[in-house]
Amino acid sequence: MTENTKEQKGKFIVFEGPDGSGKTTQIKLIYEYLRHELTEDIIMTKEPGGTEISNKIRQILLDPDNVLLEDLTEVFLYAASRAQHVKELIKPHLDQGFYVLCDRFVDSTIAYQGYGRGLDVSLIKKLNTVAAQGLQPNLSFYIMVKPEIAMQRIAQSRSFDRLEQNEISFYQNLYRGYLALLEEDDSKHYINGEQTVTEVNEDIKKVLQKKL
Ligand code: TMP
């Protein structure tokens, strides 16, 4: 488990994975589970978003009309949304001892914009070290589904935002990116998202029981 600064009393737990991985269902289940298990306070948040200003940036990022949005602009907007989110919501809660569960963080930008869209991964990492103000997740869960399954699940969902209108090659690169990131340190945990909701949930809980 990654350790952050001395003044951080809480734990920062991140859920990652491609669209269609079932990540959002799982974070809600784990939030309910930890609310009962822990004596510490807990909040659940998401990226891009989490604060009023970050949500305004999210609207620009996800608007299907923004066909002219440049890849580099996108990277800066994710970083801007994150800088606000970390400063206004995440860090203050961690400093007060909260558990903060976050749906996506820096690794989403590396996987989607770096591996998916082909932008310079080292530039994205540098920019996001600044945006995240040195904050790193104590624990991350990567809920993984193969690109074909992710695409099928997205096709079955009701609406597409700007970012869900991608080719299979994008999802293949994204998947490869997440696998590469998983290798980087042992605070990141692979979870097989192709299982049932209950099985995925049990796998996450097993890691939590061991690590917390
Ligand atoms: P969500 O569907 O999990 O709310 O995420 C919104 C979309 O934003 C999703 O398609 C993934 C994408 N995304 C990026 O491309 N880069 C990022 O840094 C983040 C946080 C999300």
Image: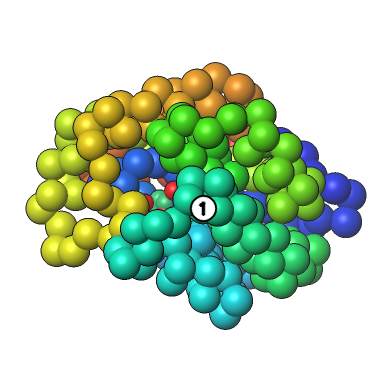
Q: Residues within 10 Å of mark 1 (few under 14, many from 20)?
A: some
Q: Is residue 90 visible?
A: no
Residue 75 place in picture, x, y as percent: 56, 49
Front residue of 200 and 22: 22
31 above or below 151?
below
Of residues 205 and 121, the one drawn nearer to the viewer in this rendering: 121
Q: Quadrant of residue 7?
A: bottom right
**2 is higher (above) or lower (below) than 197:** above
Asked whether, in this view, residue 63 is left or right of residue 156, the answer is right
Kindly tell me whether mark 1's CB lies below 8 Å from ligand 1.
Answer: yes
Kind of residue sitting beneath label 1: Glu
The image quadrant of residue 204 is top left
Seen in the picture, residue 102 relative to 180 is either above or below; the reply is: below
The image position of residue 118, as x and y in percent, is: 47, 30
- What residue appears at the point 23 percent right and 37 percent down from the top-left corner? 167
SS label for mark 1: helix
Residue at the image position 37 percent from the left and 63 percent from the top? 66
Figure quadrant of residue 107: top right
List x then y, in percent, for residue 186: 61, 25
Residue bearing the label numbered 1? 74
Quarter the C terminus occupies: top right
Residue under the point 14% across and 63% down = 158
Residue toward you, 127 or 42: 127
Which residue is at a point 19% across and 49% down the rendered structure image?
A: 154
x%, y% of residue 108? Answer: 49, 43
Residue closest to the far right: 6
Asked if residue 173 can be seen in this view, the reply is yes
